């Protein structure tokens, strides 16, 4: 498999999961400003959507959206517990978290990176994120990870998005459980490996 990613982007989530699974893969950095690869290839010819991540499968097919990609990867090695068995309530809970992270966290963080977004607009998204952080903080009061003590693909995605807090200058000190959760994720060897790999390519 080949993962197309950009350092610091949401593509860190499948990068972490690939390492958690111990699966062989290639990684290809994409310059999202120019939409070009290092060899000059136009990324739009690979992914017409223009954004990362994209996972090129061994059979030549491609997957692009994170929620679909993470479920696909988890199902490759179900014995790891990174995603519960299809059809179980636990599986739907992970999908519930993936949807929440995508719609409530990812899409609320993104405008904070826009130079075109006025400060008043950014404050609306900061306020929305604060509400979501409070919900997460309460949920994590007695849990190590989103699903309890079992690390799942949802944690890789949540950590990736929450790690943007420093880049957009969000102080998380009001949410102690959430802060501890971020540190817990950051301490995982596979997370550190993925971050190191991406830093080398940045």
Image (cartoon, helix red, strand yellow):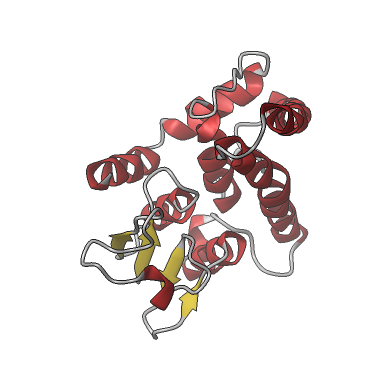
At which x and y percent is residue 194? 34, 45
At which x and y percent is residue 184? 49, 29
Where 61 falls versus 168 (above or below)?
below
Q: Residue furthest bottom?
A: 59
- The picture quadrant where one finds residue 111 is top right
Is residue 123 found left or right of 62 in the rendered image?
A: right
Is residue 100 found left or right of 40 in the rendered image?
A: right
Q: Residue furthest top?
A: 173
Q: Would you say residue 46 is visible in this rendering?
A: no
At which x and y percent is residue 176? 64, 16
Is residue 158 found left or right of 175 in the rendered image?
A: left
Across the whole image, how many numbered discs are drawn on residues?
A: 0
Quarter of the image with the N terminus is bottom left
- The picture quadrant where one finds residue 95 is bottom right
Quarter of the image with the C terminus is top left
Where 109 falls versus 137 (above or below)?
below
Where 42 falls versus 92 (above or below)?
below
Q: Would you say residue 57 is visible in this rendering?
A: yes
Residue shown at the point (59%, 22%) measured from the top left: 170
Residue shown at the point (46%, 73%) measured from the top left: 47
In this orientation, which residue lies closer to the viewer: 57 or 119? 119
In this orientation, which residue lies closer to the viewer: 102 or 38? 38
At which x and y percent is residue 100? 73, 48
Residue shown at the point (37%, 64%) measured from the top left: 3
Residue shown at the point (64%, 65%) measured from the top left: 85
- The picture quadrant where one finds residue 66 is bottom right
In this orientation, which residue lies closer to the viewer: 175 or 185? 175
Where 130 falls versus 111 (above or below)?
above
In this orientation, which residue lies closer to the viewer: 16 or 145? 16
């Amino acid at each position: 498999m080949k993962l197309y990613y950009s350092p610091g982007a949401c593509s860190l989530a499948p990068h972490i999961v690939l390492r958690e699974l111990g699966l062989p893969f290639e990684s290809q950095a994409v310059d999202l400003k120019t939409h070009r690869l290092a060899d000059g290839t136009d990324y739009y010819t690979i992914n017409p959507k223009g954004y990362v991540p994209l996972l090129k499968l061994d059979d030549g097919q491609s997957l692009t959206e994170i929620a679909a990609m993470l479920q696909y990867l988890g199902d490759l090695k179900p014995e790891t517990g990174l995603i519960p068995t299809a059809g179980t309530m636990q599986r739907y809970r992970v999908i519930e978290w993936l949807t929440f992270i995508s719609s409530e966290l990812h899409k609320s963080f993104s405008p904070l990176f826009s130079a075109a977004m006025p400060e008043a607009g950014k404050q609306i998204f900061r306020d929305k994120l604060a509400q979501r952080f409070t919900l997460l903080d309460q949920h994590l009061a007695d849990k190590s990870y989103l699903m309890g003590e079992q690390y799942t693909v949802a944690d890789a995605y949540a950590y990736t998005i929450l790690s943007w807090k420093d880049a957009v200058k969000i102080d998380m000190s009001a949410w102690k459980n959430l802060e501890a959760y971020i540190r817990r994720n950051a301490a995982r060897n596979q997370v550190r490996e993925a971050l190191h790999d991406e830093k080398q390519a940045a």
